[in-house]
Amino acid sequence: MPTQKKRLREILEGAKLVPGQTFVELGSGDGRMVRLASKEFKMKGIGVEINPLLIWWSRLLAKRQHIHNAQFIKQNVFKYDLSAAYVVYLFLMPQLIVKLVPQFESQLKKGSLVISHGFKIPTWEKKLFHEIRSEPFATFYYQV
Ligand SMILES: C[S@@+](CC[C@H](N)C(=O)[O-])C[C@H]1O[C@@H](n2cnc3c(N)ncnc32)[C@H](O)[C@@H]1O
């Protein structure tokens, strides 16, 4: 299930993005969020996705939209090194989020931002600084 198109811009606006910084989406689906972050918010966008068809589709859509500052990597999110990321976006099932927490804590730099759409990051209550309450899914913003 992708993030609803009408929510994408609102979610990115809530993050106060700095152009040129690295924006990583874990489980990027058809790449809609990475494409918007790259095209309109001038981020260096990276989508990490396990499904090769979705990688192929994301690349095709990015090419059609003349987006040159986005890349899509076919990889398991648990194998992706997050140390270059300033912003991480995810819309993943809670059981995957739990398993990602150690990776966030060991790899993400201080000051980076994690945006989780749909589900809270357990054990990160103190890092939560902003929330967009919307139906069917809320969005949670964490400062590392
Ligand atoms: C709920 S969809 C969200 C898609 C996109 N992030 C969005 O918001 O539109 C979750 C995506 O994560 C991908 N995914 C699930 N587990 C993954 C893993 N271990 N590594 C990489 N991608 C994964 C799925 O293939 C799917 O495209």
Image: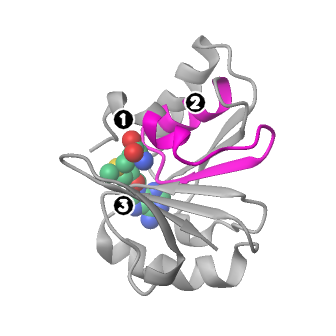
Q: Residues within 10 Å of mark 3 (few under 14, many from 20)?
A: some
Residue 21: x and y, percent?
78, 46
Residue 52: x and y, percent?
48, 43
Q: Is 82 placed above or below 50 here?
A: below
Circle nearer the N terminus (3, 1): 1
Circle nearer the N terminus (1, 2): 1
Between 89 and 19, the one nearer to me in the picture: 19
- Circle 2: element type: helix
Name the image quarter holding the N terminus: top left
CA gap, disc 1 and disc 2 = 14 Å
Callout 1 amino acid: Arg
| 89 in the magenta segment | no
Q: Residues within 10 Å of mark 1 (few under 14, many from 20)?
A: few
Q: Is 108 placed above or below 45 here?
A: below
**Circle count:** 3
Q: Which residue is under mark 3? A: 92
- Circle 1: element type: helix
Residues at discs 2 and 3 in contact (Cβ within 8 Å): no
Q: Which residue is under mark 2? A: 35
Q: Which residue is under mark 1? A: 7
Residue 36: x and y, percent?
56, 29
